Image (spheres, rainbow, N blue to C red):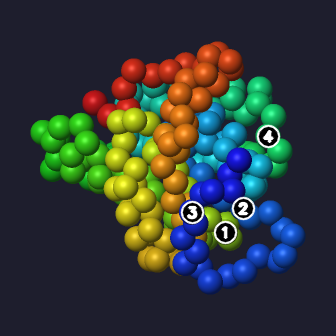
């Protein structure tokens, strides 16, 4: 299933033949993660990074994190999938978003938000020795997959770790995420995260 995704291999390091690549996957929520995990897990070992300082209020952040845990407890993946959580830091998002508070959905505020979350993922992927990093953001029909890919590719070069370039909404990825959300009884939020 996951044989067609593109990988930006900036690190130059080669895995030992036969070893399964490890990816640090930034996840925004369980519904988006449901399809991406199903898609990538046959080919990779995955650690989910739940880093989303844009999600407000704190109760919403906690609810989405709990739903990711719920998904992992119910789903069965061919390779290892685990989860890393981060401290909630709405201030990190507020500081980068403040100059763009009047931007419409999809404007510069969103770009800054993508960069914030993907940069944290790339830094951790490099520091912790992952082969690649990726994000679930592109499964949403409201997110610009080309922009996400551009940002990820730039960060791959900056940090020297590979990036998985994939528009996860292709091949009915979003539709499948809706089906999986129903199957697992996942909470589907009505907004991206920020105020």
Instruction: Say left or right for 16 vs 93.
Output: right
Q: Earlier in the sequence, mark 4 or mark 1?
A: 4
Residue bearing mark 2 = 22
Can you see residue 83?
Answer: no
Give me the C-alpha separation between circle 2 and circle 1: 5 Å
Viewer-closest of 29 and 85: 29
Residue identified by numbered label 1: 131
> Gap in Å between the C-alphas at discs 2 and 4?
14 Å
Discs 3/2, front: 3
For the residue labelled by badge 1, is the local secondary structure a helix, a strand or a loop? loop
Residue 83 image point, x, y percent: 68, 44
Characterize the local packing of mark 3: few (<14), some (14-19) or many (20 or more) Cα atoms within 10 angstroms: few
The residue under label 3 is: 6
Tell me the quarter of the image containing the C terminus: top left
Image coords of residue 191 (percent x, y): 36, 26
Q: Are marks 3 and 2 in contact (CB under 8 Å)?
A: no
């Amino acid at each position: 299933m996951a044989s067609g995704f593109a990988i930006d291999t900036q690190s130059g390091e080669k895995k030992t033949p036969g070893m399964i690549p490890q990816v640090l996957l930034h996840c925004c929520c369980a519904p988006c993660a449901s399809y991406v995990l199903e898609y990538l897990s046959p080919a990779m070992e995955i650690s989910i990074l739940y880093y989303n300082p844009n999600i407000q209020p704190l109760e919403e952040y906690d609810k989405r994190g709990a739903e990711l845990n719920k998904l992992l407890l119910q789903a069965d993946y061919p390779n290892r999938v685990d989860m890393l959580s981060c401290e909630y830091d709405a201030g990190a998002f507020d500081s980068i978003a403040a100059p763009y508070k009047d931007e419409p959905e999809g404007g510069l505020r969103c770009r800054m938000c993508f960069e914030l979350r993907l940069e944290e993922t790339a830094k951790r992927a490099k520091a912790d020795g992952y082969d690649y990093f990726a994000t679930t953001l592109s499964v949403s029909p409201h997110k610009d997959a080309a922009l996400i890919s551009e940002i990820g590719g730039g960060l791959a070069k900056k940090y020297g770790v590979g990036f998985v370039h994939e528009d996860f909404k292709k091949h009915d990825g979003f539709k499948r995420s809706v089906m999986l959300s129903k199957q697992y009884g996942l909470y589907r939020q009505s907004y991206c995260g920020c105020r």
